Image: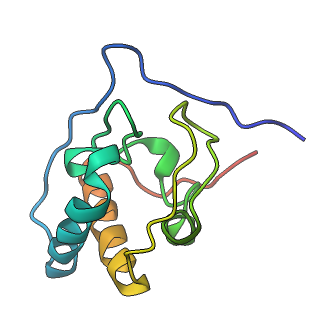
Amino acid sequence: MIASKIMGPSEKEVSVAVTIPELSPTAVKGETYYDKSCISCHGDNASGTKTGPPLIHDVYNPGHHGDEAFYRAATLGVKQHHWPYGNMPPRPELSKKEISYIIAYVRELQEANGIVYKPHRM
């Protein structure tokens, strides 16, 4: 078994610059739920913080982390595997529908920042 590489931002790269697109109505709802449940760790517009990684990063492209990975992370939590921030706890306050809005928001931000589907290769 090959271990996943743990990446980490340098001292100067705690967050990334994010281009903000005009959001769809679904993504606007997602932004609201994101701001209530995700922003404290993943930062404004999913740009990352000292406590959580940027979701606007190629490792989260839909070919490597599909929508189901986001659902599972929010509902079950996730063990640290790409970043040195520790495990992500589950977010039980979010419904599946609210998570779907957050995913739409993150995917629209990703696309506006050049993060698109790439097949995952091991």
Q: Residue at x 13, y 57 (%)?
A: 21
Q: Residue at x 13, y 51 (%)?
A: 20
Q: Position of residue 48 (x, y in %)?
A: 32, 39
Report the front residue among 19 and 97.
Answer: 97
The answer to whether residue 31 is above or below residue 10 is: below
Task: Name the colouring of the figure.
Answer: rainbow
Report the front residue among 81 and 16.
Answer: 81
Q: Specify the quadrant that holds the C terminus.
A: top right
Q: Position of residue 106 (x, y in %)?
A: 31, 60
The answer to whether residue 36 is above or below residue 49 is: below
Q: Residue at x 72, y 37 (%)?
A: 4
Horizontal relation, residue 121 to residue 68: left or right: right
Q: Residue at x 37, y 86 (%)?
A: 97
Tag count in the figure?
0
Can the viewer see residue 35?
yes
Residue lying furthest left:
22
Can the viewer see residue 46?
no
Q: Quadrant of residue 84?
A: top right
Q: Position of residue 102 (x, y in %)?
A: 31, 69
Q: Position of residue 107 (x, y in %)?
A: 34, 63
Q: Specify the quadrant that holds the N terminus.
A: top right
Horizontal relation, residue 64 to residue 5: left or right: left
Residue lying furthest top:
11
Q: Quadrant of residue 24?
A: bottom left
